[in-house]
Amino acid sequence: MQLATESRSLDHNMSPSTYAALIDSLFQNPAPLFAGAIMVAGAAVMTALKTEVALLWPCVVFLIASGAARAVDMHWYKTRRSMLTADEAARWEARYQIGAMVYAIALGTWCAVALLFSDDAVAHMICVTVTTGYVAAGAGRTYGRPWIFHVQIALACGPTAIALALKGTPYYIGMAVVSAVFFLALKQISTNLQRIFVQALVAREREAALAGQFDTALNNMPHGLCMFAADGRLAVMNHRFSEMMNLSDDLVQRGAGARDIIAACVSGGSISAASGRMILSEIENTQARDIITADPDIARSRSLSWTFQPMAGGGAVVLLEDITERRNAEARISHLARYDELTALPNRVNFRDEIGRLLAIRHDAEQLSALLFIDLDQFKQVNDTLGHPCGDQLLCAVADRLRAMLRPEDFVARFGGDEFVVFQQNLKSTEEAAVLARRIVEHLSERYKIDNHLVEIGASIGIAMTGPGVSADTLLKNADMALYRAKADGRGTFCFFRDEMAQTVEARRILELDLRKALANEEFELFYQPLVNLKSGRIATCEALLRWNHPVRGTVSPIDIIPVAEDMGLIVDLGRWILRKACMECMKWPDAVSVAVNFSPQQFHQRDVLSEVRYALEVSGLPADRLEIEITESSLLRNTQLTHDVLSQLHALGVRISLDDFGTGYSSLSYLHNFPLQKVKIDRSFLQGIDTDRPLTLLRGVARLSADLGMSVVVEGIETNEQLELISADGTVTEAQGYLFSRPVPAMRVRQLLNASHGRRLPDDQVLVLPSRSIA
Ligand code: C2E
Ligand code: MG
Ligand code: MG
């Protein structure tokens, strides 16, 4: 019972294949079993003849019958073809067990009968010897299932030992004891044998599983792998390697050498002969981890990387990787790094390198080249109004036009945004550069058709000519300075670099730096200039005008500050400061006086202009109807619908809008009609030659028209009493502004002026310069 339990617990941990192998071991070598059965039958016949005990003949028959049955069973087992499944193994185990037990009973019975029913010593010796021998042989046969063997011992040897003991003589009892010990030893031997056998089976199974895993890993890795033994023979090659190198399986099977394998790769066209030689020498001489890349397969445009790793006991591991995709990606990245993705033109880096190279290989110092820095005018407006996709298409169209205009030896690049650069080589004179620049300006200014929109832009160009020892960077810098001048000259034109531009640019750079600091250091101040109501003679509004008190430059005019601040983008912050400051100052004035604040176009088109105005009113506490915003015509030109909406919203808020400097720009009368404006300020240039008829008629016409449209009319720049008389004669001009009344003055002074104008006490030393005629 215990044996069976032991065996079963072993079976639990046993894999089906180990169990099948154990059962298979029971049926191995049937010949000794048959021979043994025949011998036992012969011995039994001998004992029957020698003792003449009749009972022994049935024992002989039993032994022969059971032996024959086992032989037949063994034979059936051998005729099976398929692998033993777990179920089949259990069935064959049961059959073997029955055969073995029946035979053991026959053997035990025969021995007991021979010992108990005769006193023939020879017969006794025969049966004890045969049983002992048979059982000893069984230990080597049935160790696979030791518990069967143990039952066999009990059934065959048990009756023998008992019969010997029953003989009662001391020698027979001694023999019974010796036999019993011997049988127990055999039992132990069979158990040990089984353990060793099972351990061997399990180890073999583990090894097979490991080999299987290794095989799976090798054949599923993305790299090709070859392992060469110390003698240069191939030890392992995975499918990926043979597939990549187009090799046949027989190479692997016959354990070919490194030379054969590489030769097959070369003859199969997978690698070139030169690469083959290089790879072979690496395999044979590899010392440390080496990596080489071979790219012989031009037809398939394939890039391969070979890695060699020496092994501890000699030989080498070769790893093969297809790096085509990585190479292509690298090529794409390096293309992106050197070309503009949108227009496919070379980019800044590429251009700089190329120009540097061209300048370095110039043999003839006299040879002229020109660098043209092109900037598109109004490109931003296209982007803002039609959207970025249209802007992108426009840039591509510009790039196409530029390409079409150039000779093969010229070089064009996009520097980002709306900046393009052309390098023009082999020129006979600077005039050729001017001709090209003119053509570019003209051609780029022609209309573009983009997504059913007709788009017009312009171009400004700065040109720098090569000279002895001029570097690419200097050329670019010079052309950029010339471009700056071309833009300042009104755009849509070109300009050659001159040395003095460098100084201007430097001065401008310093101005920009100073301006940035100025806002933080509170170097700005607002002056105020009154606008006098011509009927009441009182100050109706004061215009806030920016002043910059620079420690070295002195007081700087807004005409010099505002355009630079606009270019720098500083105008938004500066404008915010001006607006809040002016609103707060106005709170200190009499209720009837408003403040006028100038808004530059860039500031006016910022996204949150409305909330900026609302906030300034809120923090200062100024009622909206005491704020006037002065805009110029250029503010109205951009984004007409949006501008209209913002103006309407400001108007709804209660803020008044003045159109400043009317008469200097387009002077479009349609603006006066289409936008919600409450005031028109006629520029002081109208006053030039006012004493002659025509300008006066014009001024009066505009003033009357504006008044008819319900707007107040202001004339700026009144300096003399004559001018005042002329403009106020027909009563259409409502307000006047100019040095005649007051220059722009600091905040403190304007407060005193206001007190005087509004009938309050004026200190004795303060003079309000208001012409006596106009004061009511
Ligand atoms: P504006 O808005 O037309 O301001 C009137 C300019 O004419 C002022 O020049 C003023 O000093 C000048 N002016 C007034 N009366 C007379 C006169 O009788 N004779 C002469 N010759 N000039 C007179 P200012 O202060 O130099 O400002 C120049 C321009 O700078 C302003 O023209 C305005 O466009 C701009 N600006 C000034 N302050 C600001 C500001 O805070 N923001 C913005 N965006 N622009 C400003
Ligand atoms: Mg103004
Ligand atoms: Mg003005």
Image: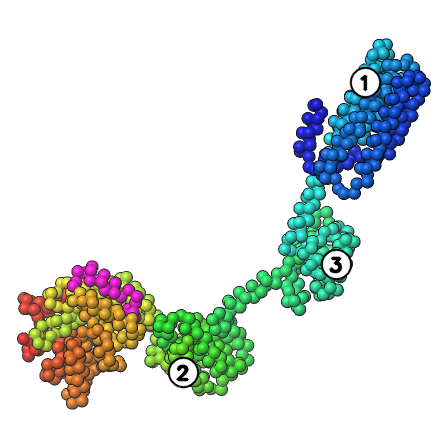
Crowd band around label 2 with a 10 angstrom C-alpha radius: few (<14), some (14–19), many (20+): few
Label annotation for residue 159: 1
- The image quadrant of residue 762 is bottom left
Q: In the rendered view, tell whether residue 151 sits above or below residue 526.
A: above
What is the magenta segment's predominant secondary structure?
helix
Q: Secondary structure at mark 3?
A: loop
- The mark closer to the camera, 1 or 2, is 1
Q: Nearer the viewer, residue 13 or 709?
A: 13
Please tell me which of labels 1 and 2 falls first in the chain. Answer: 1
Which quadrant would residue 686 be assigned to in this image? bottom left
Question: From which residue to which does the magenta span run?
Answer: 601-623
Q: Amino acid at mark 1?
A: Pro
Quarter occupied by residue 66: top right
The answer to which of 42 and 567 lies nearer the viewer is 42
Q: Which residue is mark 3?
A: 248
Label 2 beta carbon less than 8 Å to ligand 1: no
Mark before the other along the chain sequence, 1 or 3: 1
Residue 407 appears in the figure: yes
Q: CA distance from mark 1 to mark 3?
A: 67 Å
At 74% across and 36% down in the image, what residue appears?
Answer: 89
